Amino acid sequence: MKKILLILLCILTENSFAQQEVDVSVKKDSVSENSVEFTVMPYVSYNRNLKAMFGVIPMLMYDVDKTDTISPPSISGVAGVYTTNKSYFFTGFTKIYLQEDHWRLSAFVVLGDYNSQFYVTDAEVPGFYDYATKAKIISVDAQRKIVNDLFAGISLTHAYYETDYFNGKLPSTTELNSLEGSLLLDKRNDIYYPTQGYRAKLKLETSPEWLGNELASDRIIASLDHYLSMRENKDVLAARLSGKIGLGEVPFERQISIGGKDIRGYSEGKFRGNGLLALQGEYRWNFSSKMGLVGFGGLSTLYGSENESFDWDLYPGAGVGYRYKAFKKVKFNIGLDVAVGKDDFGVYFRIGESF
């Protein structure tokens, strides 16, 4: 564990203090004269676990205060997704910027029925075993600027899971109530599409027994994102170093699978454990004002897997993607990524950039 904590310390301290100082003012274009812009986006994706996914995502981008020329536009939306393995999800989300970006408030709610799988090696017949989880999640978060570009935040999350296993294990019910404290150093020159600067985040998430949890567990999440302008400020070279560390008795529903934001190219849910470390890079080529292509690659590892042979192995991932500007006045992209990993692949629909 000391080794893991030292790695995380490096993530947070190597946050480019020796780099050249950049303009960190947020680009604030009015969303429109009416300060509201509405768009509806289709959702189409595929992975080896959930299979084909279809949905729709209506979103609003707006100014909470028209006289505030510093805060970025706020964004709110809902989404409904159905998959061909008979899973479904409904979610609502919002991110609000107030008082010249001194306050950042966010919230989301998720309702879903998730049919998935996990991999075991110590069973009579090693392989994938199915499970189904009904989930209800609600979370609220508030961040306050302390000084310059340093924010401190606190969030509360309630989650309720009903999981049925199909390998002989008894069904389980898990209720999780989490309290999270966070620090964010945000030196990006733009919230939605940064072209220079960096962002360093540290979160401590705790689910103690006194909040009504049957099993006490904690999680440390740290990341460093760095952005460099390329080709006369037309393109962006981005890099991300991240770590997630589960502490205590981590319940099955809170374990981490390799894939998604930290490393693309994994969608089976095979490589699962209590924590992971990942490094990735991405080049963002904007060949027009509304469209672009990305190429990315990365490497990750995990620990705390029920399959010990998975621990501390290396899991590479690489792929390409397409981006399209979703709103007229603000550089906010949607897109589609295709990635391959170790004996796996995934297709990802993006709302915003990957990091």
Image (spheres, rainbow, N blue to C red):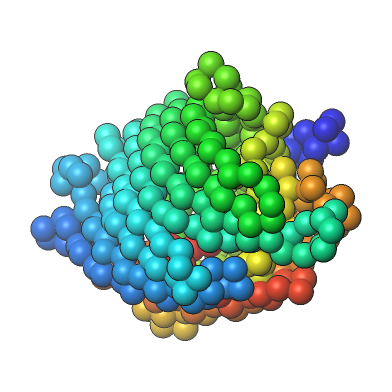
In the image as oriented, which residue stretches furthest toward the top?
Answer: 210
**Considering only vertical position in the picture, is 25 above or below 331?**
above
The image shows residue 268 at horizontal and vertical percentages of 66, 67
In the image as oriented, which residue stretches furthest toward the right?
Answer: 309
Q: In the rendered image, which quarter is residue 38 located in?
A: bottom left
In which quadrant is the C terminus drawn?
bottom right
Looking at the image, which residue is at 50% across and 20% down?
211
**Considering only vertical position in the picture, is 203 above or below 267?**
above
In-front residue for pair 70/308? 308
Residue 20 makes an appearance in the image: no
Q: Is residue 329 left or right of residue 12?
A: left
In-front residue for pair 210/41? 210
In the image as oriented, which residue stretches furthest toward the left?
Answer: 34
The image shows residue 256 at horizontal and vertical percentages of 66, 49
Looking at the image, which residue is at 71% across and 73% down?
344
In which quadrant is the N terminus drawn?
top right
The image shows residue 175 at horizontal and vertical percentages of 50, 33
In-front residue for pair 88/27? 88
Residue 82 makes an appearance in the image: yes
Q: Is residue 154 left or right of residue 296?
A: left
In-front residue for pair 51/153? 51
